Image: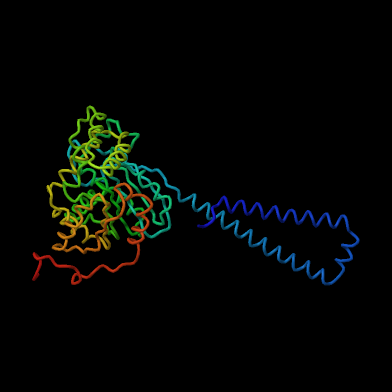
Amino acid sequence: MPPSEADRNVKGRYLAAALGVLGAAFGIVVDLFSDQVRELILSDWLRSAVRMVLQLVIFVGACLGTWLLAERHARRSRNRRTVDELTLDISSADLDDDLPNDHAVVGRRLHYLERRTESPFLAVFLPGLGLDASDFRRHMRTADEHTVALTLFGFNVEEAHSDRYRPIGLEAHAALVRVVLDNLHDRYPTKRLILVGFSVGADLILKLSEIWQAHPDKALPVKGVLLLDPNIDQTTMNISTAVAAMDTSDPLAELRRLVHQATNLTEFRNICEYLRKITEKNPDQVQRHAQDILAYCSDDDSPDQFLRRLEVLDSQTDMLRVVFSFDYEQQFNGMVAAARSKRLRREIFHVAELNHFQLIDDELLPSEMKRLTSPSRRPREADRPTSPQRAGH
């Protein structure tokens, strides 16, 4: 483990103190034994020795000074790369699609976190249902990539109960994510885009890819995509289903009822951690988002719809990774088996030995980001599995 800055400061103080003691001792010797010292100084061998010592001291001092300057520069660089809390004003010019009247967003703001680095990669993180950008702050502090984490409209804590931030639908959320991505692309046109979605944030990326498929002129070049616990079908949407049906006039009673739905300790732990995160949010916002996501993932117990959307997304990026927690273990094998009939490579799927919220901790994200930013060769069409429907084409 490399020494911390505090350890290096302590070592520097010890070195300075040692040099000071040696200097003081030399002065005392000269004062007490001045005649003897002068005789020694007159000797040739001692003059040579003193010259060598002085040269060594000058060399060590120069090295120490260079190291201190380098540390000061590195410290300033790290301070410049702090996680900044920023906002983006939403204007009518940003939204080229007509939104329903109940999706009032113009004149409001979107909140996001950004940590700038010199990396050629720009990673954008989308949070889960009712969560916000703060869930990614810990990873952003140490990530090599230039990182941005978005808080969806209406889910910023300070605006949770503002009448100006009323619930909006999935179409509007997807349109606003496009606004953010377009803005970032304009600001950093040479950086290679990576999208990371957690839970419902992963579903939102699938929705965004469908918009890009329908409007290719609006699509952005995407280097890589990481989906963390996306919803496969309605069997993976227990919490979303419960939130969508809750009575928001009495959120406390509804949240208590949600805890009682846990069938094992893992579910109980995940539900408790999730509820802790959303209690500061507007329950109407969370419920509307849950209802829309539930309608978006409308297939009852089949992964076919999810895999079709995954095919679309896979065609729009150089590298796709879909990572599931152990909570999805029962659905994983059936989903991978169904993927064999699609144009999807089995290596894009992975199950991590982690629970749902551990997927966004420091244990998994750094390795997955390294995988997405490493040089890769996208398989040729001839290398890809061919579905029966496309045979002979």
Name above or below for residue 376 compared with residue 145. below
Q: Could you say where residue 52 lies in the image, as x and y percent from the top left?
A: 75, 68
Q: Is residue 313 left or right of residue 25?
A: left
Furthest residue in direction right, as rendered? 35
Give 211 or 239, whichever is nearer the viewer.
239
Near-viewer residue (176 or 349): 349
How did the renderer colour the structure? rainbow
Q: Which of 338 and 366 lies nearest the eye of the viewer?
A: 338
Which residue occupies the foreground of this view, 38 or 102?
38
Q: How many marks?
A: 0
- The percent position of residue 144, horizontal first and vertical second, equals 41, 57
Residue 187: x and y, percent?
Answer: 36, 53
Coordinates of residue 58 in the picture (x, y in percent): 70, 63
Name the quadrant containing residue 192: bottom left
Identified at 20% across, 30% down, the residue is 247
Quadrant location of the C terminus in the rendered image:
bottom left
In the displayed orientation, state which residue is furthest to the top: 249
With respect to residue 213, does 55 lie above or below?
below
Which image quadrant is residue 123 in? Answer: bottom left
Residue located at (24% from left, 59% from top): 349
